[in-house]
Image (cartoon, rainbow, N blue to C red):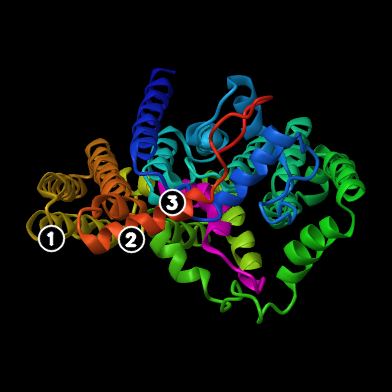
């Protein structure tokens, strides 16, 4: 029991470091449609619009209201608000997602693979963005991971409770992402009928829809055809239709390069794991790992077939990618032959060393460059000696440096803040401030707390 407790402490410490890096970075509240979420929460806190929230121009919210509810509650309790309270649901969801991912990985892959999985998840640029972002993606990912967690343990009540919450977060996709992967997994294992009965599949689906349908009926009563057009036609039907007129219409293979780039380095090890699982699919030790493989693969293919695409929609399958990657790394460090792993490890470590040298020499980030070069060198030595602990520690250090440099120096909010001294840069800063000024006010109203 000592090792799992130690691993849990390590992951919580890493999460705390990533959270501090994100919270103290320049504000990104004006980016990524977050002003819409801010407006929806203000509609609750100022006008009590718990059923239908609206943007400044009067258009209804594009998603079900769970995130807005969860953000509004601490704001009303505190009697004031700030960016931290607005993003608090994502921060809490991020921590719980990490813990559940670690728990799933322990059950299907073992303790050391679970530690690898957790480190790859928490020390990733994609995860670090979403844990402090006022949008529904992190909350949806939590409930998707929670459904997988409950399914692996055959806990139907918990599963359908999390499914209901996922539906209230982002609609049908919250139910579809985990269920499609699980159905294929059970079918391939020859256990579809047995598991469907154990999980009360049909009544579970019906019951999980009741909260969403109850809210939707109330929303239709309050907002009428406007709500129907926004939530059903534009946000659901149009995404599955020929979206050639939409700016989100992308090529069938759009997600492939984003998968490798945005989910690196876990994405490369996940592919290695998929190949290894295919070659050893009859090995009883590996059968439990197939839940992560189908959780990743089936939604990835389905989302690729949908004409409307956006990179953040892949985020709910990212924990599965990390579990696969952690399993592949654990096998390699255990001395087993894993085709392609050695070359991939050396390439990634070499890239980190090279990046450190470039940063230290070419940019005024000498300390960051030295840390990157040192971490990459430690990874190379660890690979040579097959030493798992120093390798994962060095990888975590390298990714923390990358997250810090990006959030505090290279992101658009950071660059805007840093370059405000020259005349042209002051104009850029004023333009950015103008965008922020159109965000909801942060001053509390006379009767309650409003959202800035």
Q: 353 above or below 211?
A: below
Taking the spot 48% from the left edge, 70% from the top edge, the residue there is 256
Q: 180 above or below 88?
A: below
Q: Does the magenta stretch include residue 42?
A: no
First-in-chain label (1 vs 2): 1
Spot occupied by residue 135 in the image (x, y as percentages of width and height): 58, 47
Task: Give the labeled residue for mark 3.
Answer: 126
First-in-chain label (2 vs 3): 3
Question: Nearest the camera: 276 or 153?
Answer: 153
**Mark 1–mark 3 contact, CB under 8 Å?**
no
Side of 76 where 310 appears, left or right: left
Quadrant of the image occupied by residue 141 = top right
Can see residue 37? Answer: yes
Q: What stretch is highlighted in magenta?
A: 304-328
Quadrant of the image occupied by residue 164 = top right
Task: Give the labeled residue for mark 1.
Answer: 358
Q: Residues within 10 Å of mark 1 (few under 14, many from 20)?
A: some
Element on which disc 2 rests: helix
Side of 263 where 428 appears, left or right: left
Quadrant where the image shows the C terminus: top right
Spot occupied by residue 217 in the image (x, y as percentages of width and height): 91, 46
Can see residue 67? Answer: no
Element on which disc 3 rests: helix
Taking the spot 14% from the left edge, 47% from the top edge, the residue there is 381
Spot occupied by residue 167 in the image (x, y as percentages of width and height): 75, 46
- Mark 1–mark 3 Cα distance, whole angstroms, equals 23 Å
- Mark 2–mark 3 Cα distance, whole angstroms, equals 27 Å
Indicate which disc residue 428 carries.
Answer: 2
Q: 384 above or below 346?
A: above
- Mark 1–mark 2 Cα distance, whole angstroms, equals 28 Å
Element on which disc 1 rests: helix
């Amino acid at each position: 029991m000592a090792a799992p407790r130690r691993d849990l402490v390590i992951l919580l410490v890493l999460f705390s470091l990533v959270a501090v890096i994100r919270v103290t970075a320049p504000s990104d509240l004006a980016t990524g449609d977050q002003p819409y979420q801010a407006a929806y929460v203000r509609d609750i806190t100022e006008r009590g619009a718990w059923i239908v929230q609206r943007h400044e121009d009067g258009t209804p919210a594009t998603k079900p209201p769970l995130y807005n509810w969860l953000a509004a509650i601490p704001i009303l309790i505190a009697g004031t608000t700030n960016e931290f309270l607005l993003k608090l649901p994502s921060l809490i969801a991020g921590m719980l997602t990490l813990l559940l991912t670690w728990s799933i990985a322990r059950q299907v892959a073992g303790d050391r693979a679970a530690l690898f999985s957790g480190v790859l998840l928490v020390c990733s640029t994609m995860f670090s963005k979403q844990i402090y972002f006022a949008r529904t993606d992190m909350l949806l990912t939590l409930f998707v991971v929670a459904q997988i967690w409950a399914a692996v343990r055959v806990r139907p009540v918990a599963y359908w409770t999390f499914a209901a919450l996922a539906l209230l977060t982002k609609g049908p996709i919250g139910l579809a992402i985990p269920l499609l992967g699980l159905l294929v997994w059970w079918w391939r294992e020859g256990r579809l009928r047995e598991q469907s009965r154990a999980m009360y599949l049909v009544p579970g689906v019906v019951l999980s829809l009741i909260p969403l349908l109850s809210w939707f009926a109330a929303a239709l009563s309050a907002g009428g055809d406007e709500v129907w057009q926004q939530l059903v036609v534009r946000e659901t039907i149009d995404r599955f239709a020929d979206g050639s007129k939409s700016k989100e219409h992308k090529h069938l293979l759009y997600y492939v390069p984003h998968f490798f780039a945005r989910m690196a380095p876990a994405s490369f090890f996940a592919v290695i794991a998929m190949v290894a699982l295919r070659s050893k699919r009859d090995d009883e030790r590996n059968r439990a790992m197939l839940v992560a493989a189908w959780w990743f693969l089936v939604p990835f293919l389905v989302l690729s077939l949908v004409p409307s695409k956006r990179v953040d929609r892949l985020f709910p399958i990212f924990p599965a990618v990390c579990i696969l990657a952690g399993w592949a790394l654990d096998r390699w460090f255990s001395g087993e032959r894993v085709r392609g792993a050695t070359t991939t490890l050396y390439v990634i470590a070499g890239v980190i060393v090279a990046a450190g040298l470039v940063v230290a020499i070419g940019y005024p980030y000498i300390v960051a460059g030295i840390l990157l070069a040192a971490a990459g060198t430690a990874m190379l030595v660890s690979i040579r000696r097959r030493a798992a602990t120093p390798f994962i520690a060095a990888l975590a250090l390298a990714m923390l440096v990358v997250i810090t440099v990006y959030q505090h120096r290279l992101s658009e909010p950071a660059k805007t803040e840093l370059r405000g001294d020259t005349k042209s840069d002051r104009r850029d800063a004023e333009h950015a401030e103008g965008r922020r000024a159109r965000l909801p006010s942060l001053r509390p109203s006379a009767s309650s707390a409003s959202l800035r």
